Amino acid sequence: MKTHEIRRVYIWITLFSIAMAFLETAVVVYMRKLYYPEGFNFPLKIMDKDIMVVEVFREFATLVMLLGAGFIAGRNRTEKFGLFLYSFAVWDIFYYVFLKVTLDWPSSLMTWDILFLIPTTWVGPVIAPVIVSLVMIAFAFLISKSTSKNIQTKINLAEWLLLIGGSIVLIIGFVYDYIRFMLEYFSFAEIFDPSKIQALMAKAVLYIPESFPWVIFIVGLMIVIGGVVLFYSRNKETN
């Protein structure tokens, strides 16, 4: 793929992701007007069960759309994956940009937020997902640079193990504090049981984040970066 073609792909993926971010922001603006008219903060408020279910599926639909954008634009699996990472990261960053513009929130990068609801609630300071998104963007650019020189470029097994393993550690970091709290009332399996959603929501209103497990987060991030570095080192002769 020629340079101008890559540039055109990134321009459209960027515009798509920014537009998706604004749609996400619009939903959050409406939700906060309904449930947090005084401004969002912990503890959480009980949401209508139907709205909660719709929210979970909306998040899943958003992932499918971001994944679809990357798979439509990419030429092989590696490039598709890289463009998905880029699309997701731009969406995530601009989501917070638009929240700041529309609601003047978050007050700082250390403000706690609900990051995700699948398979359970993820929480953490805003800066944490932003850092992960910046790493994703860097990796996406490395993938594009390599595949533009060699369309056969692939992520090998060792790199996948580091990327997946590090991502799992990062997820553990994001759900750690919430699960720690919920284990006071439920078994580990019950926390992930859809039939317990009302009981879980009843206890969620008592949850206030205590501390973010930065050690777990940094370990996971370093493992992911290790996979990125391995990929770069193996393909640098084509970069």
Image (cartoon, rainbow, N blue to C red):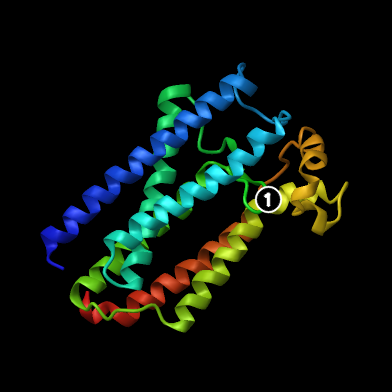
| Residue count near mark 1 (Cα–Cα under 10 Å), binned few <14, some 14–19, many ≥20 | some
Q: Quadrant of the C terminus?
A: bottom left
Q: Is residue 118 visible?
A: yes
Question: Would residue 113 appear left or right of 152 to someone viewing this image?
Answer: right
Find disc 1 in the rendering and name its residue: 120
Q: Residue 81, position in %: x, y?
A: 38, 65
Q: Residue at the location (72% across, 49% down)?
A: 177
Q: Residue 211, position in %: x, y?
A: 70, 45
Foreground residue among 125 and 62? 62
Q: Residue at the location (62% across, 46% down)?
A: 117
Q: Residue at the location (46% across, 32% down)?
A: 25
Q: Secondary structure at mark 1?
A: loop
Q: Residue 122, position in %: x, y?
A: 63, 48
Q: Is residue 106 visible?
A: no
Which image quadrant for residue 83?
bottom left
Residue 130 position (above or below residue 100) = below
